[in-house]
């Protein structure tokens, strides 16, 4: 009787540890398989943010969105690749920071190319920023 | 005759826009890619996060400086930490950005057109988590090879900004976190 009880407690404790361990090591959101909450162009997203920031935040902040645009510039700093998408506003862009937790088929991008990315919207400073981006239409060489 | 004022403004804009870039003191500098790192060092745990999308604008003529960063753009190694940081502590959906507004001491001594290292104090107000507090820090400018780098590091007392850490986590999260900011500044040229 007593040994059964000990066994039960042991199983409970072990499963507790396991659940705790899984929660602690919870993986980052898998952007590639997340369905986007919205799909729009870089110009549209920027325009929405510029006309009403809080309304745009209510719609997009912390959500995975899919974005289309033309690459204006690419920068790489300490493994962080940032792609700027051109918009109709010459002073502002949509910055897409590639996800450091995903593997990317390509990390070199040419400017002027059309690209479709998916990422989590972080809001606007001068530019609208999307973090944890993945490329949806990798170009095949 | 509604057109007239518009034409005058257009003329003024085209004239001022075509003036040569300012020389000597003055000029505006900016970055949209400042690297900001965050360190919390507590007895139980070291927590680090970083972002590369800090913004900063500096007007050298007046010494005025403004900087901002999106809270949600900080990346943590552990997804759980990033989630807690955004949802429980910083409440990034309510307060999506942290903003600093202030000015540099003696901006006239900063000749960013000349190579060298310049140190100056930056004083102003920091808004984090919807709460604004005064703060100051030393900024180091390094100019060389046609590039301008600015760096600073400062401490933020978490409780000052109304960020509550539950008793259970008190030994995991530092009461004072260290922030470092590094960025390359570009001169803002009017085109």
Image (cartoon, coloured by chain):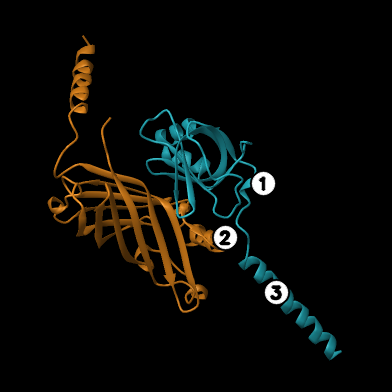
Chain colours: A cyan, B orange
Q: Position of residue B107 (x, y in %)?
A: 16, 52
Disc on res. B156: none
Viewer-nearest of discs 1 and 3: 1
Q: Chain of mark 1?
A: A
Residue farthest to the top, as pictured: B1
Q: Earlier in the sequence, mark 1 or mark 3?
A: 3
Check residue A33 in the rendering and tell me which mark sits there, or answer none.
Answer: 1
Is residue B45 toward the left or the right of residue B139 in the image? Answer: right
Tell which of B153 and B145 is nearer to you: B145
Q: Which residue is mark 3?
A: A16
For residue A14, side relative to residue A86 (left or right): right
Dots 2, 3 in contact, CB < 8 A: no
Residue at image position (34%, 53%) is B183
Horizontal arrangement in the rendering, residue B74 relative to residue B181 (left or right):
right
Residue labelled with disc 2: B79
Q: Residues within 10 Å of mark 3 (few under 14, many from 20)?
A: few
């Amino acid at each position: 009787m007593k040994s059964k009880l000990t066994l039960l407690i042991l199983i409970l404790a072990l499963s507790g540890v396991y659940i705790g361990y899984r929660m602690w090591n919870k993986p980052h959101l898998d952007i590639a398989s997340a369905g986007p909450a919205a799909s729009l162009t870089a110009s549209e997203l920027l325009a929405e943010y510029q006309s009403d920031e809080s309304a745009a935040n209510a719609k997009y902040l912390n959500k995975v969105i899919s974005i289309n645009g033309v690459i204006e510039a690419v920068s790489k700093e300490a493994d962080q690749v940032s792609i700027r998408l051109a918009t109709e506003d010459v002073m502002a862009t949509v910055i897409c920071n590639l996800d450091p937790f995903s593997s990317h088929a390509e990390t070199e991008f040419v400017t002027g190319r059309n690209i479709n990315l998916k990422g989590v919207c972080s809001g606007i400073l001068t530019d609208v920023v999307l973090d944890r981006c993945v490329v949806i239409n990798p170009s095949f060489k | 005759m509604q057109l007239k004022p518009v034409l005058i403004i257009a003329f003024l804009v085209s004239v001022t826009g075509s003036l040569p870039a300012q020389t000597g003191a003055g000029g505006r500098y900016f970055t949209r890619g400042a690297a900001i790192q965050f360190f919390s060092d507590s007895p139980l745990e070291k927590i680090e996060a970083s972002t590369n999308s800090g913004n900063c604008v500096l007007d050298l003529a007046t010494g005025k400086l403004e900087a901002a960063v999106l809270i949600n753009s900080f990346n943590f190694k552990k997804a759980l930490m990033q989630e807690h940081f955004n949802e429980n502590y910083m409440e990034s959906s309510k307060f999506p950005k942290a903003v600093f507004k202030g000015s540099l001491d003696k901006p006239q001594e900063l000749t960013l057109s000349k190579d060298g290292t310049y140190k100056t104090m930056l004083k102003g107000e920091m808004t984090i988590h919807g709460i604004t507090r005064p703060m100051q820090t030393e900024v180091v400018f390094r100019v060389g090879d046609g590039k301008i780098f600015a760096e600073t590091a400062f401490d933020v007392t978490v409780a000052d900004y109304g960020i509550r850490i539950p008793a259970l986590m008190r030994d995991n999260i530092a009461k004072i976190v260290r922030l470092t900011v590094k960025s390359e500044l570009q001169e803002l040229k009017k085109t």
